Image (cartoon, rainbow, N blue to C red):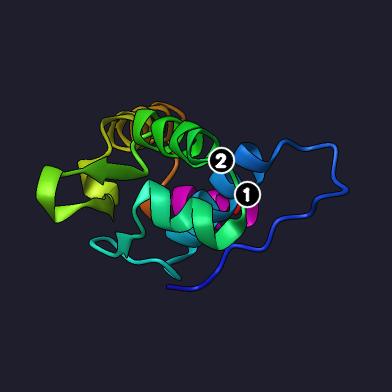
């Protein structure tokens, strides 16, 4: 597992830096769905953080649907297809685009420009 570099001089709290890095890597595909993350204790030791700091980041990521915790299987990057929020937002955008008369290609071009 790649280490997640944290900036000790940043005004952004360490748990938020970690949360953003994991979420960004999951969204980009660098951490594909099913990738197992280190345990809270292991990652805390690697990053020289308190276990509660890593646990806070993991809780936020789980709440956002980025990761899932599966007992003995560990903590895994969730599939985007498993994210209710992403599915709902996608359906809402598709409905809005249709109501405004956009073609599928036009709607996807707007997504690409926004990305």
Instruction: Inspect the magenta stretch and tell me whether residue 2 lies in it.
Output: no
Q: Position of residue 8 (x, y in %)?
A: 81, 50
Q: Position of residue 43 (x, y in %)?
A: 46, 56
Is residue 60 something that shows in the picture? Answer: yes
Q: Which residues are magenta?
A: 106-114
Circles 1, 2 touching at the beta carbon (< 8 Å): no
| Residue at position x 49%, y 33% in the image | 52
| Magenta stretch encompasses residue 107 | yes
Residue labelled with disc 2: 50
Q: Which residue is mark 1?
A: 114
The quadrant where residue 34 appears: bottom left
Task: Categorize mark 2 by other alpha carbons within 10 Å: few (<14), some (14-19), many (20+).
Answer: some
Query: Could you tell me which residue is drawn at 51 percent across and 56 percent down?
Result: 45
Left or right: residue 44 compared with residue 68: right
Which residue is more in the foreground, 75 or 40? 40
Which type of secondary structure does the marked residue at label 2 adopt? loop
């Amino acid at each position: 597992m790649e280490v997640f570099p944290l900036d000790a001089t940043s005004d952004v709290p360490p748990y938020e830096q970690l949360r953003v890095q994991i979420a960004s890597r999951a969204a980009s595909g660098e951490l594909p769905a099913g990738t197992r993350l280190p345990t809270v204790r292991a990652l805390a030791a690697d990053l020289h953080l308190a276990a509660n700091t890593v646990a806070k980041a993991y809780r936020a990521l789980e709440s956002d649907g980025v990761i899932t915790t599966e007992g003995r299987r560990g903590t895994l990057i969730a599939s985007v297809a498993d994210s209710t929020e992403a599915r709902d937002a996608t359906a809402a955008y598709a409905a809005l685009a249709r109501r405004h008369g956009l073609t599928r290609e036009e709607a996807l071009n707007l997504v690409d420009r926004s990305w």
